[in-house]
Image: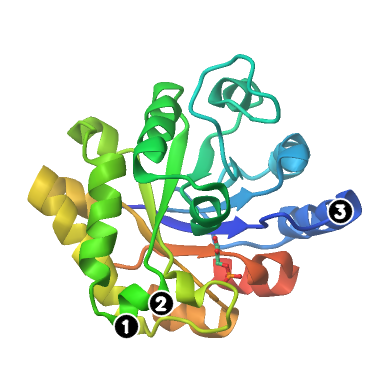
Amino acid sequence: MRKKVIAANWKMNGTLEQANDLLDAFASATLNVNEEKIAVFAVPAPYLLLAKEKLVGNPFLKVAAQNCYSKKSGAYTGEISVEILKSIGIEFVVLGHSERREYFGESNSFLAEKVNISLEFGITPIFCCGEPLEIREAETQNAFVAKQLEESLFHLTAEGINKIIIAYEPIWAIGTGKTASNQQAQEMHASIRSVIAAKYGADIANEISILYGGSVKASSAVDLFAEPDVDGGLVGGASLIADEFIKIINA
Ligand code: 13P
């Protein structure tokens, strides 16, 4: 069963006081979440345990790390391993966000290693892909995104790929207020699904949740999430405003 997933990506935002307030608001809100529709909160690492504690009352509210390292443990100062994440009960990790790719030089092959170790530890990767503006303008976005998937995910077995959540985030729409049109999002999501189907078969492709990210707002979420291949969102700015993100979850 393909799940709906509404994920918050707080990025490097929020003091402890703000994190407390936001998490309290989500913990006490009436949210339309269930077995088939979950909300995931990717908070800064120092707040992971706090988020677990605050959201423990609702089994459909999950906590994600925003990144992990590719090794199990060892002398990698400043990094966070999936072994550590697992030990504190984290079930999801965002991998390959465009900001990680751009500012920290994360390549498709390096991300493949992170995907592997996450799956090894039973942590679900929310794997981000998406094209920069010049690729969109050259109209080669489908091939660009297909290559990201091929190089980071297509070494996996069918069982492995089935555990991945994909987030399509056109870089030109992140934090810019510019959203891909519903049609642009649907076209890319359908393209991603067809690339997966070509490699793993239609049944597996139909099981995978594909989220859209890039300036999602409460006002755009209802129509966007109604597209047949859009299974939810990965939300940055709007996830830091409690009322706005609650509306997106309930959209
Ligand atoms: P915005 O919603 O702020 O555009 O961020 C999108 C994003 O990068 C989520 O991961």
Mark 2 is on which residue type?
Leu
According to the image, label 2 marks what residue? 133
According to the image, label 1 marks what residue? 137
Q: Nearer the viewer, mark 1 or mark 3?
A: 1
**Quick one: SS at disc 2?**
helix
Residue at horizontal 73%, vertical 53%? Answer: 27
Residue 202 in the image, given as x and y percentages of width and height: 11, 52
What colour scheme does the image use?
A: rainbow
Residue 14 in the image, given as x and y percentages of width and height: 81, 57
Q: How far is disc 2 from disc 3 in space, using C-alphas?
A: 32 Å
Tell me: residue 75, above or below residue 22. above
Crowding near the residue tagged with mark 3, few <14, some 14–19, many ≥20 C-alpha atoms within 10 Å: few
Quarter of image, res 174: bottom right
According to the image, label 3 marks what residue? 15
Q: For the residue with label 2, is its CB less than 8 Å from the closest atom of ligand 1? A: no
Q: How far is disc 1 from disc 2 in space, using C-alphas?
A: 6 Å
Nearer-the-camera pick, 166 or 38: 166
Residue 201 appearing in the image: no
